[in-house]
Image (cartoon, grey):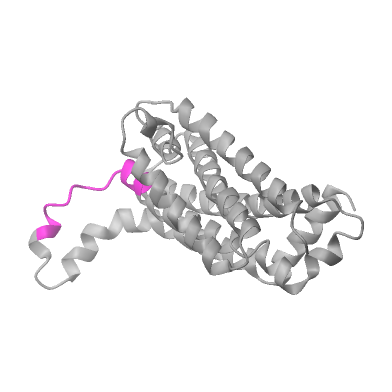
Amino acid sequence: MNLLTSLRKELIEQWRTYRLLVLCLVLLVFGLSSPLLAKYTPELLKLIPGAEQFAGLVPKPTLLDAVAQYVKNIGQFGVLLALLMSMGSMVAEKERGTAALMLVKPLSRGVFLLAKFLALACSFLAALALAALAGYYYTLVLFGPMDVGAWLALNGLMWLEMLVFMALTLLFSTLLRSQAAAAGLGIGAILVLSLISSLPTFGDAMPDKLVGWGVSLFTQPAPAWPALWFSLGLILAALLAAWLAFRKQEL
């Protein structure tokens, strides 16, 4: 069984278990709602008793507010979904015994693991594409046109950040025998990288700087090349470590 066949099997499984559908719906909803929230937050404040006086203090929303709201919603929930969908990728296969069955096809462990990661990456790319399309449309309607190239680059950089935590959680799922433990370590990785991000010099290379780079494309571009190279390296290192650990495990 080659990589494409294994990848197809993983994508079909995600569709049949409704994980892909749920992922697309969640990100689509946030893609649609983000520009709406940015536009109508001042109006919503006026409807809250006692908050009318604060509504006047809120500046008139702009296109950048819509972008910021989109980044906040998609960034937070995208990373969370990356953890949830990755935490059981390997653990569940080993628990059910399906990993052992698949590996006698014959299918190499490296291809098996890579297909898992690529299926998740493709699923998130499709879901993020839907969210980006919806977010762009409503931003266009409510705030006017924006730079398409910058919008695509922003979403691409957000996808790359999700891939980082996806690869790390997949590694933890390979090393451990508990989905909860894999998710816990994934959350721990987020916290550790967030703490390092606040440090001088080292912080410039953390994955969250990718999103800042994407947002800066709408005003004054501030490239974060160290974050790009470190994120790609972290993904490759996590996948390599997962493969080295998986090839020695008894199923």
User: In the image, residue 234 lies at what x, y percent?
Assistant: 56, 39
**Residue 59 falls inside the magenta stretch:** yes
**Taking 239 as reference, is 204 above or below it?**
above
Residue closest to the eye, 155 or 83:
83
Q: Which residues are magenta?
A: 54-68
Residue closest to the eye, 55 or 232:
232
In the visual, does 7 lie left or right of 148?
right
User: In the image, residue 56 lies at what x, y percent?
Assistant: 11, 55
Residue in the image at 21% along x and 58% along y: 42
Residue 138 visible here: no
**Taking 195 as reference, is 216 above or below it?**
above
In the visual, does 151 lie left or right of 236?
left
User: In the image, residue 46 lies at what x, y percent?
Assistant: 16, 65
Location of residue 218 by image quarter: top left
In the visual, does 166 lie left or right of 239?
left
Residue in the image at 38% along x and 26% along y: 222
Residue closest to the eye, 209 or 107:
107
Residue 191 visible here: yes
**Residue 10 falls inside the magenta stretch:** no
User: In the image, residue 115 lies at what x, y percent?
Assistant: 75, 52
Location of residue 199 by image quarter: top left
